[in-house]
Image (cartoon, rainbow, N blue to C red):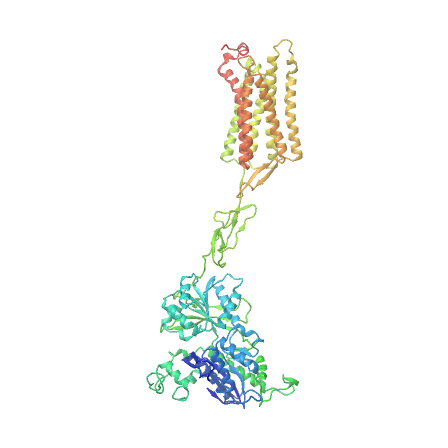
Amino acid sequence: MYTQGDFVLGGIFPLHYNQEMPDLNSTYQPPPVKCNGFDPRAFRWALTMRLAVEEINRSKELLPNHTLGYKIFDSCDYPLTGQRAVLAVVNGVTEKDHGICRGASPLLAIIGESGSSQSIVVSRILRPFRIPMISYFSSCACFADRRKYPTFFRVIPNDDYQVKAIAQLLVHFNWTWIGLIRGDREYGRFAVQGLLRELQGTSVCVFDIENNHPLQHTVYVMSSSRAKVVVVFSAEGEMTPFLKDYMEQNISGIQWIASEAWVTASVFSGSHYYPYLGGTIGFGIRKGYIPGLSDFLQTVTPYIYPSNPLVHELWEALYGCASVPSSVVDLPICSGEETLMAKHAAYMNTSSPRVAYNVYKAVHAVARSLHNLLLCQPGVGPFENSSCAQSNNIHPWQLQHYLQEVEFNIGGEEVKFDLKGDSVPYYDIINWQRSTGGNIEFVLVGLFDGTKTTGQELDIQEDRIIWAGHQSKVPVSVCSDSCAPGSRKAVRRGEPVCCFDCVPCDSGKISNETDSVDCAECPEDFWSNPDQTACIPKVVEFLAYDTVGIVLTVISAVGACLTIVVLVVIFHHRYTPIVRMNNSELSFFILFALVLCFLCSLVFIGEPTNWSCMLRHTAFSITFSLCISCILGKTLVVLAAFTATRPGNNVMKWLGPNQQRAIIFTSTLVQVVICVAWLIDAPPYPSRNMKYERSKIILECSNGSSLAFWCVLGYIGLQACLCFLLAFLARELPGNFNEAKFITFSMLIFCAVWLAFIPVYISSPGSYADAVESFAILASSFGLLLCLFVPKCYIILLKPEKNTKQHLISRDKK
């Protein structure tokens, strides 16, 4: 299609989507490429260019006194035929149409191409001639490289914005595991690279469905994957064979994310596509309004344009009949009463034109740029020496200068180009829904405005969206289910970060969010709850008045009461022989010390404080040292009393009451000195033990100085061993009541208890160590009480006849 004018525009459209390539063996001139598969949609685009040119020619405000012409050629949706089309636009249909090129090019600009692969070829051919081209459908980000494509402009947004919009959509709906399909052309390759770049740093992982495998393999991979959301960057021509195999496998439930190349493709709007493509969502070119387009399209019939073969092909595609008899196609003859109706959406979609609206804007951009060029005033022009272009000899590169600066508003939309030739980025968000007639209709459910700040571009009306499977609930597409609070994500080896296992948090760590990457460690005084979702204060443990504490308290009280009872009995019978012969004063001292020993075990019960920690070991050590010192004194007295009966032995004068008190005082004073030195140098203090059991805080008394602690115990042990040795030597002394035997037994019990105490105490933490020490104090105290005083009480209370001096000093015959 062509018409003459003062200035000529070229147009290249994919009027056919298949081609039969001739044999190119270089032995003869190849015949023309045969194109087939007429595309009514692309024909509507070409007619829109024609309508726009005619509208501008009628305008009195735009290019007055000048007319535009056009030359429109078919690229057959293929780079090689697109190359032939651009050469035909520039030079003519045949090689004889033009001789040697002279002067300015008769062609000022080209409107085209649709596919990015074809536009790459066209732009490279036009580059040496500096002829600008404005694409209405090539969105590949590669065209932003001004060094390679210096004359390229477009009224469709750059794919960088489209992939940004798709990435924001995926993040918005929390789809973390998606499939990705692309066509095997530059458009798909660059779009995929851009999407992967945009998704870096997000939670979205891409499951790349390999495109170099057979279609059946691709369909199988899709059906077996957990990725229920699939993004497709492909032209509708490439989608057709894939969807055929996909539908034959009867796969459904896939949520398709469509690129602008096929999201409004009416070829897929039939009712039989809905079970497989229903719910598709994608970003489409903004629709606009083209005045007079519907009426203009209805005037294009084979009866008005009988010599135009494209119009005859349109009729064959829409009605399946031939407008004129033909030997090439076997079709019935049309009746001549056919009318264009809404059901011919591929051709008659004039209510929401998108690509056609881009064509309309492109033609107006060239016309307004040319208009501005013609308004140039000499002396203030943009060219050399402030000159302007000559109206009768305008070069394409001069028009390009004005194209770069053109800015106008059409239909409420701003049209301008940045330094890379890109236009203002707007997208409509399209959802494929079932119409009342059963076909698929493209419903507007949102907008992407690339001029807004990052994060604010996306505006979605979620309540209007119908998802795959005719569902109103947002589909889920994840490689692994979310990890609940209390667990963390553990990435599987060799798999993307979106594929993970959920691992429970370790003890002492929590995660209170879904899909936590790591578990946070609780503060020192806190521990994780059973669900590992919150930190709670650690249990504080010490020897409290619970079951163990109460038992020890009762035992301590019972022991102290028994000791007092024994003291009362001994005091009441203090003048009887058994009491007087066994040194009643020392007995009273021992019983007093035992009462203190029983009571000092109470200091180990309760929360440790500075005073209680210092009192525990000092009170225990001094009272036991006092008790053992008294027993030591008694042992020496017993041993000396029987030794003094030998002639010439006056040892008793050295062990009188004063000497005995001195022995007790001196022996106890040594322990007191050790304790005082301990308290001055490194006294015991309360500490928090969190090493033995990390979930608890064990309050215990730290010894302060381990050396002092073991010196205290060692001194008591030394006294006990000395007592035991002396008592053992006196065990065979005569008499029915030899107290040395009972002292020997008491020291055996005492030493056994404390020897068993040492390893148990070392291996027991906190409250257990306190309980063990309290038990050792009580056990040894009971041992001393029972061994030393129960035999005396037995004779005093139950065998008073034996409580005589004669009986006690005599020895029964065996």
Q: Is residue 674 visible?
A: yes
Name the one closer to the observer, 225 or 214: 214
- Can residue 350 be seen in the rendering of this structure? no
**Side of 276 where 704 appears, left or right:** right
Residue found at the very far top of the displayed protein: 647
Q: Nearer the viewer, residue 135 or 638?
A: 135
* 526 vs 231: above or below: above
Q: Quadrant of residue 230?
A: bottom left
Residue 30: % across, % down: 45, 83
Q: Position of residue 187 (x, y in %)?
A: 49, 72
Can you name the residue that lies furthest to the front here?
Answer: 27
Q: Give percent across and percent down for residue 421.
A: 56, 77
Residue at 51% from the left image edge and 20% from the top image edge:
790
Tell me where residue 100 appears, x and y as whole percent: 55, 89
State whether residue 404 is above or below residue 528. Answer: below
**In the image, 277: left or right of 735?**
left
Q: How many marks?
A: 0
